[in-house]
């Protein structure tokens, strides 16, 4: 089975060809980071226009690299949501046109399902497993029970964790996207440096698996505002001070994530006491964070689970994960009509209760 995947829901334009033997025949990702960098965040109109400019070429390149003609495909999968709606429309419309002209099944993929099933592409994991999905738009703990079957244990009541990294980086005068910048700066600090900036661990020690990052953001701002004159160089914090604060922030995030994941592990083991295999999977762009991975590996190990972290290129947004979700869905006969309507919001577990104090996040 050969599937073309298309991803356009955020700021990466991507096309990939994947088969049902878990082989990625081609995977092209064009990041728009430089186009959005001057604005310190993603501008939806710029994103949609850029997807439109580049998607056809990326699809052609992916097919050429895979040495696959459109006629040989078994289906065309594209992200149908959630995400920035202008971009989603570009991708799904392209997929519909290809499906119509070449008479192929269309598979509209939930972007989050793409992230959630990646560990089955990279590591051939059996169901069920526990998933920490940590991206720029989401922060959720889910039990992945099967294709299309998710039990959400917790979500963020305010910011997503990647968003928190991005905002923290901005406050510290670091570049965008903020996660890698914070991680790099944090690496230059010692434990003693970090202790100068005590930050809260929101919701840690409390029952449940929800997350909150807004209090941490406020505390970070207060730490920066409270800096002494000798911490500054020409009005901005010195690099060593930035490194110490970044390190303190990363420690606080890792503590919170490990605390919430610990509660989720307990719930997972209660629900599946007899599971033959036990895995904690971390997915999404924030899964690239080494400090976070290390913390979660220790936690998983203590509780008798194995931490699975897909390769970085599959953790950040890409189309191979969308093509793979297409393989998984098509194998089960799940296809979509050409009247599929793109969805700006599309929760993986529609039955999950809203987090206390939750805003608009899925
Ligand atoms: O999954 P992703 O590529 O896009 C979506 O949001 O769907 O995630 C992007 C997010 C950004 O917020 C970025 O700052 C964060 O992942 N990120 C990291 C790291 N690399 C990327 N956060 C912490 N540490 C990193 N090394
Ligand atoms: Zn994503």
Image (cartoon, helix red, strand yellow):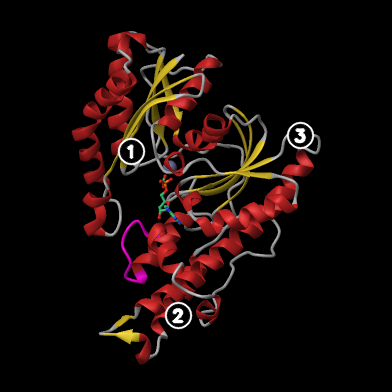
The residue that mark 1 highlights is 85
- Nearest the eye: 67 or 30: 67
Residue drawn at 36 percent across, 91 percent down: 230
Residue 207 position, x and y percent, is 71, 58
Crowdedness of circle 1 by 10 Å Cα count: few (<14), some, many (20+)?
A: many
Residue range corresponding to the magenta coloring: 171-178
Q: Which picture quadrant has residue 270?
A: top right
Q: Which mark is residue 275?
A: 3
- Vertical relation: 79 (above or below) 180: above
Crowdedness of circle 2 by 10 Å Cα count: few (<14), some, many (20+)?
A: some
The residue that mark 2 highlights is 223
Residue 39 position, x and y percent, is 24, 58
Q: CA distance from mark 2 to mark 1?
A: 37 Å
Q: Quadrant of ligand 2?
A: top left
Crowdedness of circle 3 by 10 Å Cα count: few (<14), some, many (20+)?
A: some
Residue 98 position, x and y percent, is 29, 16
- Nearest the eye: 345 or 66: 66
Which numbered disc, 3 or 2, marks the residue that appears first in the sequence? 2
Residue drawn at 30 percent across, 20 percent down: 63
- Nearest the eye: 69 or 269: 69
Which numbered disc, 3 or 1, marks the residue that appears first in the sequence? 1
């Amino acid at each position: 089975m050969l599937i073309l995947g298309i991803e356009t829901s955020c700021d990466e334009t991507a096309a990939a060809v994947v088969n049902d033997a878990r082989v990625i025949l081609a995977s092209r990702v064009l990041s728009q980071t430089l186009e959005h960098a001057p604005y310190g965040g993603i501008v939806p109109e710029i994103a949609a226009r850029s997807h439109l400019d580049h998607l056809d070429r990326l699809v052609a390149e992916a097919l050429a690299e895979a040495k696959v003609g459109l006629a040989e495909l078994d289906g065309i999968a594209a992200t149908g949501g959630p995400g920035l709606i202008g971009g989603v429309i570009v991708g799904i419309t392209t997929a519909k046109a290809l499906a119509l002209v070449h008479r192929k099944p269309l598979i509209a993929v939930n972007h989050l399902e793409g992230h959630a099933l990646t560990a089955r592409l990279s590591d051939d994991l059996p169901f069920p497993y526990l998933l920490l999905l940590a991206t720029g738009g989401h922060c959720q703990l889910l039990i992945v029970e099967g294709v299309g079957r998710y039990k959400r244990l917790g979500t963020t009541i305010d910011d997503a964790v990647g968003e928190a990294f991005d905002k923290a980086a901005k406050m510290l005068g670091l570049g965008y996207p903020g996660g890698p910048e914070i991680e790099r700066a944090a690496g230059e600090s010692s434990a003693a440096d970090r202790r100068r900036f005590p930050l809260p661990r929101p919701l840690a020690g409390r029952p449940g698996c929800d997350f909150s990052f807004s209090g941490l953001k406020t505390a970070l701002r207060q730490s920066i505002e409270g800096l002494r004159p000798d911490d500054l160089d020409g009005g901005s914090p010195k690099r060593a001070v930035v490194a110490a604060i970044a390190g303190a922030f990363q420690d606080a995030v890792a503590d919170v994530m490990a605390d919430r994941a610990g509660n989720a592990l307990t719930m997972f083991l209660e629900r599946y006491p007899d599971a033959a295999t036990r895995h904690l999977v971390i997915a999404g762009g924030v899964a690239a964070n080494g400090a976070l991975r290390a913390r979660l590996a220790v936690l998983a190990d203590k509780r008798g689970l194995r931490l699975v972290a897909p390769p970085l290129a599959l953790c950040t947004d890409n189309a191979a994960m969308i093509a793979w979700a297409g393989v998984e869905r098509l194998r089960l006969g799940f296809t979509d009509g050409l009247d599929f309507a793109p969805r700006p919001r599309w929760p993986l577990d529609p039955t999950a209760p809203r987090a206390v104090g939750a805003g608009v996040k899925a």
